[in-house]
């Protein structure tokens, strides 16, 4: 239990289970299975082995020397989750959940995905264990994340393109939940973020906390101190809680959560649920949700498919309320600038989601000043974004060479 979990399945007023009654037995079955598995040394050792031999953990901690010089302040250190197998932090979660599905005797896996990284990680894990996999993905995300769609299909997954609503992550999750309701007996739903009904926010956090635990130990080994700030992008929040959780008790370490500012908060075209949302229920849990004036879930917007979501994990909403998070936003333009800057200065192609964190890391480094250190969770690589990002850059700068 982390300091944020105030009661069972609740983070202050957030969390809980707001689902059709037909799903309650499945969630109770999952909760019981996870409670047993998380104290089973054989299960835990198998997950650790998978992440080492299949995933490539531990991922490195790297000093970004040229970004540090450009920013002109604190040292910038990168936790290289982009080097994990399949290209992002998502595999930490899918390996654990698919092993849990096997333990529970489930014969079919479904998942939702936005940027496609969770879908790729789920499909790859299912391929390794010989399980059929269906991935629900908004049709707009299928278009802008076509390399990941191709990878999922090569791994044997069936892609269900969702044409309803904004045709993005929110709608994909809606359809995945509907599919789960009708096949709960044999189907395991691998949720990709710290969202959804209890126990998913806790389950996903526990599987992702390896990021922060590794990073904390690496910092102590490399420079015999903790970082002064930890920066991560936030959509649903799995990479953010993955790195933040290990540092929650260290109150001297600033935790900076960077949301999708889109075209600016004033325009309404953004994905900043912590900054501009209000209490509501989305996809089975209470959290901070973007809403219209009459209380309907609003459409989110971001240049990055993985941050294009109108909600956020309930634990992050609670951490914001109690003042543990420093919540900021980065616009589409700022993320694209940071994307290019990281490529040119460090030889690293970051995901557009991660580029939001890099955009605000510049400010944090300058605020902290020399002699301090800022740790950025480089949550994913940007191969998936390349065509989309270059098109967006060209649209903003006609005639420019990228």
Image (spheres, helix red, strand yellow):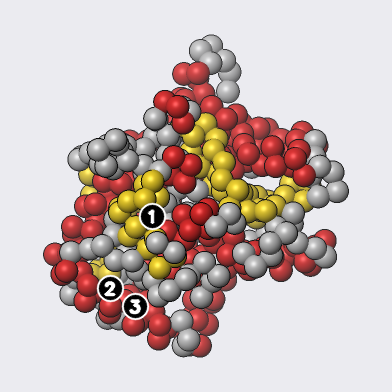
Which quadrant of the structure image shows residue 217?
Answer: bottom right
Total marks placed: 3
| Residue depicted at x 21% and y 76% | 25
Q: Are circles 1 and 2 on residues that touch, CB within 8 Å? A: no
Report whether 39 appears left or right of 199: right
Give the residue pinned by disc 1: 287
Q: Crowdedness of circle 3 by 10 Å Cα count: few (<14), some, many (20+)? A: some
Q: Crowdedness of circle 1 by 10 Å Cα count: few (<14), some, many (20+)? A: many
Report whether 208 appears left or right of 18: right
Which quadrant of the structure image shows residue 13?
Answer: bottom left
Give the residue pinned by disc 3: 31
| Residue found farthest to the top | 399
Give the residue pinned by disc 2: 27
The residue nearer to you, when weighing 4 against 125, is 4
| Residue depicted at x 73% and y 59% | 252
Kindly state the secondary structure of the residue where label 2 is placed: helix
Report whether 368 appears left or right of 266: right
Q: Are circles 2 and 3 on residues that touch, CB within 8 Å? A: yes
Q: Crowdedness of circle 2 by 10 Å Cα count: few (<14), some, many (20+)? A: some
The residue nearer to you, when weighing 248 against 227, is 248
The residue nearer to you, when weighing 85 against 340, is 340
Query: Disc 2 to disc 3, how far (Cα)?
Result: 6 Å
Query: Disc 1 to disc 2, how far (Cα)?
Result: 19 Å
The residue nearer to you, when weighing 286 against 93, is 286
């Amino acid at each position: 239990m982390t300091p944020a979990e105030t009661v069972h399945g609740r983070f202050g007023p957030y969390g809980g289970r707001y689902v059709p009654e037909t799903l309650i037995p499945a969630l109770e079955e999952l909760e019981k299975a996870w409670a047993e598995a998380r104290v089973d040394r054989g299960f835990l050792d198998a997950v650790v082995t998978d992440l080492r031999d299949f995933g490539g953990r531990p991922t490195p901690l790297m000093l970004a020397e040229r970004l540090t010089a450009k920013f002109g302040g604190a040292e910038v250190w990168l936790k290289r989750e982009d080097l994990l197998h399949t290209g992002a932090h998502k595999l930490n979660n899918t390996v654990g959940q698919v092993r849990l599905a096997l333990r529970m005797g489930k014969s079919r896996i479904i998942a939702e995905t936005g940027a496609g990284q969770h879908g790729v990680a789920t499909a790859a894990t299912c391929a390794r264990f010989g399980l059929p996999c269906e991935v629900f993905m908004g049709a707009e995300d299928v278009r802008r994340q076509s390399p990941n769609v191709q990878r999922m299909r090569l791994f044997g997954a069936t892609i269900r393109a969702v044409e309803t609503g904004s045709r993005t992550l929110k709608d994909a999750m809606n359809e995945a939940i509907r599919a789960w309701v009708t096949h709960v007996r044999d189907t395991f739903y691998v949720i990709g973020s710290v969202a959804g009904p209890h126990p998913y926010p806790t389950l996903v956090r526990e599987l992702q906390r390896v990021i922060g635990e590794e990073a904390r130990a690496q910092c102590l080994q490399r420079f015999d101190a903790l970082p002064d700030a930890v920066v991560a992008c936030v959509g649903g929040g799995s990479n953010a809680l993955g790195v933040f959780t290990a540092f929650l008790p260290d109150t001297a370490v600033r935790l900076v959560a960077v949301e999708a500012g889109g075209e600016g908060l004033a325009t309404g075209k953004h994905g900043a649920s912590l900054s501009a949302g209000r209490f509501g229920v989305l996809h089975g849990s209470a959290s901070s949700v973007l809403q219209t004036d009459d209380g309907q879930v609003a459409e989110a917007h971001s240049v990055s498919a993985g941050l294009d979501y109108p909600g956020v994990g309930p634990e992050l909403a609670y951490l914001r309320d109690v003042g543990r998070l420093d919540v900021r936003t980065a616009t589409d333009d700022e993320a694209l600038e940071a994307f290019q800057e990281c490529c040119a200065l460090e030889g690293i192609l970051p995901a557009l989601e991660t580029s939001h964190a890099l955009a605000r890391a510049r400010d944090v480094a300058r605020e902290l000043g020399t002699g301090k250190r800022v740790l950025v969770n480089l949550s994913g690589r940007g191969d998936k974004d390349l065509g989309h990002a270059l098109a967006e850059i060209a649209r903003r700068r006609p005639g420019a060479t990228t």
